[in-house]
Amino acid sequence: MPDIIVMGGGICGLATAMMLARDGHEVTVLERDDEPVPPTLEEAVEDWPRRSVAQFRQAHYLVPRGRDVLDAELPEVTAALLAAGAMRFDVLAIMPPSIADRAPRPGDERFVTVTARRPLVEWVLARAAAEEEGVEVRRGASVAALLSEPRDGLPWITGVRTEAGEALRADLVVDATGRRSQLPRLLADVGAAPVHEEAEDSGFIYYTRYFRANGGGPPAYRAGPLTPFPNFSLLTLPGDNDTWSVTVYVGSGDRALKALRHEAAWTAVVRACPRHAHWLDGTPITGVLAMGGIVDRYRRLARDGKPVATGVLAVGDAWACTNPSLGRGMTLALVHAAYLRSFVRHHLEHPRELAEVWDTVTEAELTPWYRSTVSEDRARRRQLDAHRDGAAQPRPADPASAARALLPVAAMRDADIYRAMIDTRSCFATPEDVVARPGMAERVLELAADGAETPPGPDRAQLLALIAG
């Protein structure tokens, strides 16, 4: 009999299962997709369908805090990623030439990460999980219902029933099914109070293409990985095995820019950006991969300080999911999984206590990241909408908001503020926490008093002409 069931066999579910198994638990992972793990990396990258993961082929990036968690919790996974061709990437190494102070600082090593395309990361984890003592992964096993009993006036989840009709009992059920989690419906079916949920369209459409080097490795950075232009943003990310991705993302309400799904239009726009055009100097290995309808969504399995059920916890994107362009999803899922391992050690035998502690810690440690990302999404949408409509650019409402908005500008002019900014991009500190540091907001506002530089690239008229061909 499994004592823990993990619903979902993606990156979050597999990492969670392996962490829990290392504390002596028998963990059964139920993954709805029935395709077996491909025997080779090439087959995983080219042919693994992963139908339940909408973003499987889109750009992915493990920010440094995620690497930090892997090193601490699953160090052989880090080693296996590197052995499979993942790239070791030092974010500090792309400090812009506008910063004269290049002296190292204590702690600079925290900015190194290991990153790769999503299929490689999941393939490595799947192979590691298959060899992990105490982990059983069942593919093609969908959960139809939760099993429950009353306890402490709440539904106590005691296992699951699969679509095949098999009843599996467990001491804990963990939902790691990602963006498509059906947990609120499953809980409602056993009489739980409604789950608190907040959701809004992130407001972006992503157009991604992958390239492989013709020799010499990935291109050099001449701008930051994420560069906002007046009418779109460009995201350039290192991959694995001399590959990289280039993503153009736009406001979902900008109908004229949806022509970027065509390779000629997409290429013309990237080529018109002088600091990014060289990212096209490789062999394309995909067409333009489009993705829209991405929701920022947050769920809390508690109301008025009381859990809606016990014996079940949500982790990673099943708890909250956000705009992927900031690259926080994989990392926050790993952070969440590491917290789960810690609290299961001490509270598994007390389901209500575990539910309450999990809610408290998630709210304190993870929810600020969700709130910060949504705030950043909204601000960027307002900018894009104003440029599209020819309206005045929105102004931050208060000095702290202004400092957060100008942090990337000041970071191009000061080595310590640059580190502070990449603390936020690395998931070590939220932008809100960074600008609250003593003297930080004042220094940012001073350095960025003349505003942001507009990166060289097409204006609105030129952009529309490029797309029209």
Image: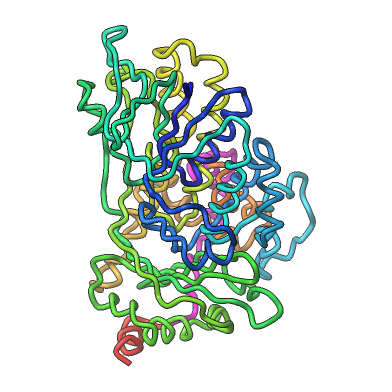
Quarter-wise, where is residue 121 in the image?
bottom right
Whether the magenta-drawn stretch holds residue 235 is answered as no
Q: Which residues are magenta?
A: 430-457
At a point 36% along the width and 59% down the height, the residue shown is: 380
Q: Position of residue 452 (x, y in %)?
A: 48, 66
At a point 52% along the width and 70% down the height, the residue shown is: 245
Whether residue 243 is situated above or below residue 188 in the rendered picture: below
Q: Position of residue 385 (x, y in %)?
A: 27, 66
Please name the colour scheme applied to the rendered image. Answer: rainbow
At a point 39% along the width and 13% down the height, the residue shown is: 352
Whether the magenta-drawn stretch holds residue 443 is answered as yes
* The C terminus, quarter of image: bottom left
Residue 371 seen anywhere in this rendered image of the structure: no
Q: Position of residue 60 (x, y in %)?
A: 50, 58
At a point 36% along the width and 56% down the height, the residue shown is: 51
Q: Position of residue 215 (x, y in %)?
A: 69, 81
Residue located farthest toward the bottom when viewing the structure as drawn: 469
Whether residue 278 is situated above or below residue 68 in the rendered picture: below
Residue 95 seen anywhere in this rendered image of the structure: yes
Residue located farthest toward the top when viewing the structure as drawn: 152
* In front of the other: 160 or 465: 160
* In front of the other: 81 or 60: 81
Compared across the picture, whether 414 is left or right of 12 comes to right
Whether residue 283 is situated above or below residue 434 in the rendered picture: below
